[in-house]
């Protein structure tokens, strides 16, 4: 590795730490109140026991709805700014505000506003975060990098109910959010230390070689000095901060006083991307995967409470089988980079189909039934990981084939729209079906959705017509 490659390599390593951490944190907040929400609604907000399922589903769906609504806008703004860091910092403000309201709220309106702010934070991170990863990593490793992002999404979504249930049982409602505040502090440090790839390329050679031969590096970067022996320029990294330069150039431009002649702006890439068949298939896979996974968030804790008489800790532990397969995300991403997204995602939906249908056989309280439930949940977790990770890489390939490398954030804005829509549909559908039709009908419907998605993904995924040969080589092997 040459000295000129050092900043890019360091930035790639940093980005693949910051983005998964932020992804995990956002969905950690989403899921941490899943097992405690039924108890909190009754004990803190005074909701009647008969309305707990309804309000649990509504509050979960509210986050996904706001995420879907604002994600395309976040993508468009991110693609037209000079830095990805500023939107991420704004998302952090939304996250901290939402966490505070959920922590101190004792009424339904306050809890709802907290979920809205949480949805805004997710709209930013899951639009800008994956686009930042695609900007940074090598094109042939996109799906593998998305494996870490998908792993973090699953970890945050699934492990949070486990920890939330345990802490709630041991310490009460508000201490649950101490974990979120701790993660927020870590995220602040990581985000402030993050340097984008295009900024790292501007680092002077003397900075890169600070551990090497200082004299040689100093000769390369020797700068003229004035009579007072001070350098004319200092700290190029600070002076060329893209956030500060964007604001300064706008405020100092004459356009504020003398607006240029009106010109029709180019149409957002969102419109072209929303008609691309390849991208629409990938978005359907993401939408279906979100429905299938989020259905458990809405009903699983209440199902095991009524079937096995489990308390909040045990209800949180039942999410653990869904979590473990997420550790295989980077491996599955590597396979997606090598063989394409079609077959891993298709096999994932096919594997999930019988597992969902067989969940109908969990009907009473016995050891065998508990083992069966955990085994089927583990199969579902592995199958849905095989869908999510390759399809996140497929979105990057579809955007590159249609719009080049200038619209990744808008592409992942559509990803967020599909994923957030799945959160809404999954929460509301699962809660409604279980209340009105029962557990058996719900699992049958989820199995049918998985089977139908396997047909769509298996038949339509991959480049088509004029798009063949575009994008990354591995992702065109469909």
Image: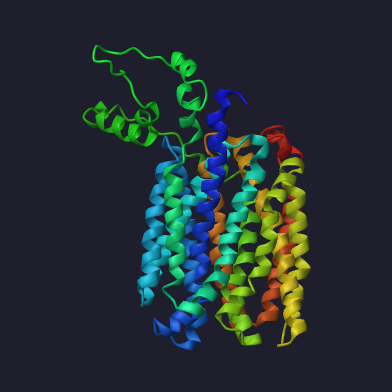
Vertical placement of residue 133 versus 101, above or below = above
Vertical placement of residue 295 versus 342, above or below = below
Examine the image and state in which quarter residue 218 appears.
Answer: top left
Q: Residue at x 56, y 24 (%)?
A: 3
Would residue 385 be found to the left or right of residue 159 on screen?
A: right
Quadrant of the rendering where the C terminus is positioned: top right
Examine the image and state in which quarter residue 337 appears.
Answer: top right
Quadrant of the rendering where the N terminus is positioned: top right
Query: Front-most of 141 and 261?
Result: 141
Vertical placement of residue 253 versus 86, above or below = above
Residue 309 in the image: state x and y as whole percent.
62, 87
Residue 391 in the image: state x and y as whole percent.
66, 49
Would residue 453 be found to the left or right of residue 159 on screen?
A: right
Query: Front-most of 319 and 110?
Result: 319
Number of numbered discs present?
A: 0
Residue 109 in the image: state x and y as whole percent.
36, 73
Residue 33 in the image: state x and y as whole percent.
49, 71
Vertical placement of residue 185 versus 443, above or below = above
Indicate how the structure is coloured in the image: rainbow
Would residue 64 be found to the left or right of residue 337 on screen?
A: left
Query: Front-most of 478 and 244?
Result: 244
Query: Front-most of 276 and 147?
Result: 147
Q: Is residue 199 visible?
A: yes
Q: Is residue 281 visible?
A: no
Q: Residue at x 65, y 86 (%)?
A: 307
């Amino acid at each position: 590795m040459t000295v000129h490659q050092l900043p890019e390599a360091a930035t790639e390593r940093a980005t693949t730490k910051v983005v998964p951490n932020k992804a995990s944190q956002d969905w950690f907040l989403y899921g941490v109140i899943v097992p405690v929400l039924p108890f909190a609604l009754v004990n803190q907000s005074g909701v009647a026991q008969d309305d707990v399922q309804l309000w649990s589903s509504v509050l979960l769906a509210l986050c996904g709805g706001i995420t879907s609504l604002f994600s395309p806008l976040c993508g468009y703004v991110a693609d037209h700014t000079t830095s990805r860091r500023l939107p991420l910092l704004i998302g952090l403000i939304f996250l901290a505000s939402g966490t505070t309201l959920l922590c101190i709220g004792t009424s339904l309106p306050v809890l709802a506003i907290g979920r809205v702010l949480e949805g805004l934070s997710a709209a930013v991170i899951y639009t800008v975060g994956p686009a930042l990863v695609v900007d940074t990593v090598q094109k042939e490793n996109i799906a593998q990098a998305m494996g870490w992002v998908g792993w973090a999404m699953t970890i945050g979504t699934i492990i949070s109910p486990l920890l939330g249930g345990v802490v709630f049982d041991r310490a009460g409602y508000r201490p649950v959010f101490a974990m979120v505040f701790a993660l927020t502090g870590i995220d602040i440090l990581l985000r402030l230390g993050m340097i984008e790839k295009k900024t790292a390329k501007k680092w002077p050679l003397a900075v890169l070689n600070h551990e090497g031969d200082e004299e040689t590096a100093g000769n390369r970067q020797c700068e003229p000095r004035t009579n007072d022996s001070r350098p004319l320029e200092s700290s190029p990294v600070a002076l060329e901060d893209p956030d500060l330069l964007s604001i300064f150039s706008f405020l100092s431009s004459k356009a504020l006083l003398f607006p240029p002649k009106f010109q029709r702006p180019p149409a957002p890439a969102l419109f072209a991307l929303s008609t691309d068949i390849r991208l629409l298939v990938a978005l359907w896979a993401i939408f279906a995967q979100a429905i299938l996974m989020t259905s458990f968030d809405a009903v699983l804790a209440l199902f095991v409470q009524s079937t096995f008489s489990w308390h909040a800790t045990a209800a949180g532990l039942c999410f653990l089988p869904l979590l473990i397969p997420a550790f295989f995300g980077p491996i599955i991403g590597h396979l997606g980079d090598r063989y394409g997204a079609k077959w891993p995602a298709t096999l994932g939906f096919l594997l999930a189909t019988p597992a969902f249908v067989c969940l109908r056989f969990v009907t009473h309280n016995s050891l065998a039934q508990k083992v069966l439930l955990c085994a089927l949940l583990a199969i579902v977790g592995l199958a849905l990981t095989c869908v999510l990770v390759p399809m996140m890489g497929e979105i990057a390939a579809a955007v590159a084939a249609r719009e080049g490398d200038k619209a990744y954030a808008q592409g992942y804005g559509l990803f967020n729209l599909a994923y957030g829509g799945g959160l809404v549909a999954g929460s509301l559908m699962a809660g409604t079906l279980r209340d009105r039709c029962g557990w058996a009908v719900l699992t049958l419907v989820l199995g049918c959705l998985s089977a139908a998605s396997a047909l769509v993904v298996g038949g339509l995924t991959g480049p088509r017509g004029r798009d063949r040969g575009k994008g990354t080589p591995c992702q065109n092997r469909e």
